[in-house]
């Protein structure tokens, strides 16, 4: 995955700035392309910088829960296989 030089909070802050000024002007100020700002806008939409932190926490929790469900499903499959062999 490509590393970016801006954090997600900074991206959202730049987007809010682009809402007030023209996109090419903001892009030039931060040394990025206008297309980058449009891509960020597509990804982050109307989020505020504080919302990005909460979104990251929810994504982390969601990943943890998906892993937990996968582990439990695997355990259930193993137990079903063992119970079939007993009978």
Image: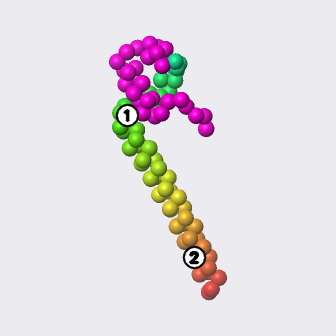
Q: Kindly identify the residue that appears in the image at 52 percent across and 23 percent down.
A: 36
How many numbered marks appear?
2
Circle 1 residue = 49
Q: Magenta stretch containing residue 27, yes or no?
A: yes
Decide whether the magenta segment is chiefly helix, strand or loop: helix
Between circles 1 and 2, the one closer to the viewer is 1
Q: Position of residue 7 (x, y in %)?
A: 48, 33
Q: Residue 74 has which mark?
A: none
The stretch of residues the image draws in magenta is 1-30
Q: Residue 79 has which mark?
A: 2
Sooner in the amino-acid sequence: mark 1 or mark 2: 1
Q: Kindly identify the residue that appears in the image at 65 percent across and 82 percent down.
A: 85
Q: Position of residue 45 (x, y in %)?
A: 41, 31
Crowding near the residue tagged with mark 1, few <14, some 14–19, many ≥20 C-alpha atoms within 10 Å: some
Residue 77 in which image quadrant: bottom right
Residue occupying the far bottom of the picture: 87
Q: Is residue 21 visible?
A: yes
Nearest to the observer: residue 12 or residue 81: 12
Q: Is residue 20 above or below residue 87?
A: above
Q: Kindly identify the residue that appears in the image at 44 percent across and 44 percent down.
A: 56
């Amino acid at each position: 995955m490509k590393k970016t030089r801006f954090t997600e909070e900074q991206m959202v802050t730049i987007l809010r700035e682009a809402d007030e000024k023209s996109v090419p002007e903001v892009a030039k100020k931060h040394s990025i392309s206008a297309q980058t700002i449009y891509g960020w806008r597509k990804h982050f939409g109307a989020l505020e910088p504080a919302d990005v932190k909460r979104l990251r926490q929810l994504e982390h929790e969601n990943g943890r829960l998906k892993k937990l469900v996968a582990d439990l499903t695997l355990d259930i499959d193993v137990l079903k296989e063992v119970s079939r062999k007993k009978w």
